[in-house]
Image (cartoon, helix red, strand yellow):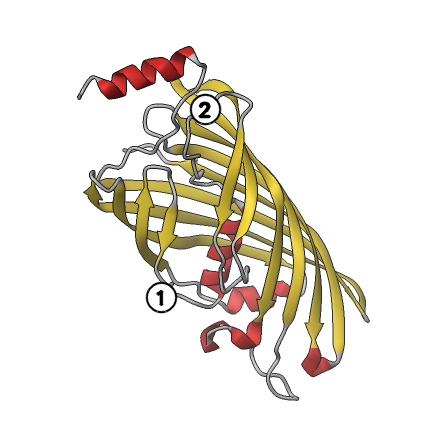
Amino acid sequence: MKTLPLALLALFALQGEAPLRRTLKEGTDTYKMEAKVFQTVTGPMGEIPMNISSLSTYALKTTKVDDAAGTALVEATTTVDKLDADGPMAAMVAQQKPKPTTQTGKMDVRGRLTFDKSAGAGLSSMLSGAQATASAGTFVEFPEKPVKVGDSWDVIVPKSPMLLDQDQKLTAKLVGERTLDGTPVWVVSVSGTIKTAIDTAKLPKEAQLPDGPMGPMNMVLKGEMALTGEGLVDKATGKTLSMTTKATSKSNIDLASLGMTLDSVGTIESKVTLQKAP
């Protein structure tokens, strides 16, 4: 029976196909996440630029592996290391003190991450959610069946109370092979459109906007992001070594308490890189 997997691998190789899988092993993988948001909001006062850049550390800790089930318990902690802004957002961002957010959940051999309900909220959670959405495919969801170069499959972007009101689908494609610092990698592209939806009145209290002179400052945002990205996946382990993405966004912001509607357009650039062990 132990020779069957080898025989199957040999058959897939002859067909030019490869079963993309994530090796599950206890330990911690640390990523650096860079995000740059360039936004222009248009309203009664004209055009207002709102730019934010951040650098975060994302630590994914695998605590227990179930080989029979092909799953592992994981704990992911996002820490905002640096946060800068200009324009009208600068003062508000400067007053914030983002706290690390931690999520627990599971990962399977297809690289699918499912998290329990987040314990964090506020600006730190929103930044984490924005980065995770903008860099969808940080941990590429592998297809169920073996694929060959040129094949495509769906990648699920799970709903988030901070950004998405339902699961979304992107398209991943096995583009080819490459070598990164001597490591053989698969090149996987990710593309598609994500529809965003935020109603601040439905967020946890600590994530809501501060009250204004007229009472609660609720905001309803609806829009979409067209995203493209490229990931480099270690052939041997299935770990994502790097992922770069760019998304163009267009949204409508309804500030009912102020009787005001704003339009927003912009871009989000994100880069995620696995850090080498010291």
Q: What residue did someone put label 2 on? A: 186
Residue sticking out furthest to the bottom: 214
Give the total number of marks visible in the rendering: 2
Q: Position of residue 63 (x, y in %)?
A: 21, 47
Amino acid type at mark 1: Ala
Lower position in the chain sequence, tag 1 or tag 2? 1
* Image quarter of residue 191: top right
Which quadrant is the N terminus positioned in?
top left
Name the residue: 70% across, 72% down.
254
Residue sticking out furthest to the top: 14
Q: Position of residue 73 (x, y in %)?
A: 25, 49
Amino acid type at mark 2: Trp
Q: Position of residue 229 (x, y in %)?
A: 57, 36
Give the numbered dot on residue 119. Answer: 1
Q: Position of residue 130 (x, y in %)?
A: 53, 54
Give the numbered dot on residue 247. Answer: none
Measure the C-alpha gap from mark 1 to mark 2. 34 Å
Do we see residue 242 in this rendering?
A: yes
Give the secondary structure at mark 2.
strand
